[in-house]
Amino acid sequence: MDHFALTNGVLHAENVPLPAIAEAVGTPVYVYSRATLERHAQVFSQAVAGLGKDGTPLIAFAVKSNPNLAVLKVLQRQGFGADVVSGGELRRALAAGMAPGKIVFSGVGKTRAELELGLSEGIGQFNIESLEEGRELAEVAHSLGITAQAALRINPDVDAGTHDKISTGKADNKFGVPLVRAGEAFAELAGLPGLNLRGVALHIGSQLLDLTPLETAFAKIGALVGELRAAGHVITHVDLGGGLGVPYQPHEEPPSPADYGAMVARVTEGWDVHLTFEPGRVIAGNAGVLLTRVVRVKRGVRDPFVIVDAAMNDLARPALYGAYHGFAAVEPTGADMTANVVGPICETGDTFAMGRECDALSAGDLAVFRTAGAYGATMASSYNSRGFVAEVLVDDEKFAVVADRIDAGAIMDAERVPEWLA
Ligand SMILES: *Cc1c(COP(=O)(O)O)cnc(C)c1O
């Protein structure tokens, strides 16, 4: 459920008509709804409440899905921590007021400087993704005279049944340590000074529309916890990752957080560990739209091209993954059309939809791409020297710009022609 709906024929974000935002901030612009973010946070929190050892699992929002500071602040106020994958994301989580103890650091390529940053900030847990990283983390922590809290990320070799580029738990994906080598890795790492290897972590992929692969992977992790304990290791923490999908298309029915929570309760029964969850998309996806204006409508061979002022540099998912985003007029007339929806970028990949049945639109009209709150603005680039889109957060009847538009000129200002070329 989200808070983007028609009121008197005009699409609103909560109680703000979208034309008012387009007027004030220009287009394209990402618009997020605070009420939607909070609702999703609460639904997820309720779904996992009571699970794990002390019944207070850590919910670490996957910052990469939407790193905007204001969005992080909304979630921090809901008690969320953060799952970060870079020093930059770690700084954002801290800047949003997230407690260091509620920050989990994931990623296969954490640099030494990033390990040091996490250690000096006292983050809650490093999810280490290799034996090599574990050794380095132990060494760095030991040299700083501290002990790093860590979990070993396991690659359970389960096909998440999602798009190849967002599958992360198959044997040939770069993430984690193969299940069969987990024992070895624990045997070496658990004895190192500077490291408290206290658990395991996994994350098998994103936009999962079925709980079965998650359940299969979790069951493997449960068995592993038993084996590790039998080998004498103390396992107190398991991080179950993220991955729950959202409905991008009307026919998609992803499992609800409640169904997910019930499955987790069933599979983790008796594990006797503290649980961490890392939801991203399911929290932020439907909490945002990309508001755009039609530049012109061009006649096509079959269907017309609706050329909008947003492009693949602003919303990369269709170009990257062939992803579907709902597309709708802000002031629908009731008429519809079949259109190819494209951006202005000089790439055929800059296509949001081909042959899409949608509201009738003409030049100057406003429209939205729905479900753009996750993996939207965060994946933007300045390709074609288009600059970075602004972001707005709505709260009931008010709204604020929470990220300025960075125009092409500002980006050019960071460039130099060397003296010897001038
Ligand atoms: C991307 C990612 C997530 C979040 O995935 P969603 O599908 O957005 O829930 C969680 N954990 C890790 C380690 C990730 O890389």
Image (spheres, helix red, strand yellow):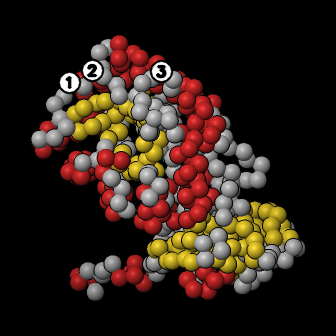
**Could you tell me residue 418's position as x and y percent?**
26, 80
Mark 3 residue CB less than 8 A from any atom of ligand 1: no
Q: Secondary structure at mark 2?
A: helix
Local packing at callout 1 (Cα closer than 10 Å; few below 14, some 14-19, many 20+) is: few
Q: In this picture, is 128 found above or below 26?
A: above
Residue with the mark numbered 2: 187
Determine which quarter of the picture holds residue 357. bottom right
In the foreground, 211 or 322: 211
Q: CA distance from mark 3 to mark 1?
A: 26 Å
Q: Amino acid at mark 3?
A: Gly
In the foreground, 80 or 360: 80
Q: CA distance from mark 2 to mark 1?
A: 7 Å
Q: Earlier along the polypeptide chain: callout 3 or callout 2?
A: 2
Q: Secondary structure at mark 3?
A: loop
Determine which quarter of the picture holds residue 206. top right
Determine which quarter of the picture holds residue 365. bottom right
Residue with the mark numbered 3: 270
For image coordinates 20% across by 24% down, the residue present is 191
**Could you tell me residue 215's position as x and y percent?**
58, 28
Task: Using residue 90 as the reference point, say whether residue 79 is left or right of it.
Answer: right
- For the residues bearing labels 3 and 1, Cβ distance under 8 angstroms: no
For image coordinates 12% across by 44% down, the residue present is 144
Local packing at callout 3 (Cα closer than 10 Å; few below 14, some 14-19, many 20+) is: few
Q: Amino acid at mark 2?
A: Ala
Q: Amino acid at mark 1?
A: Gly
Residue with the mark numbered 1: 191
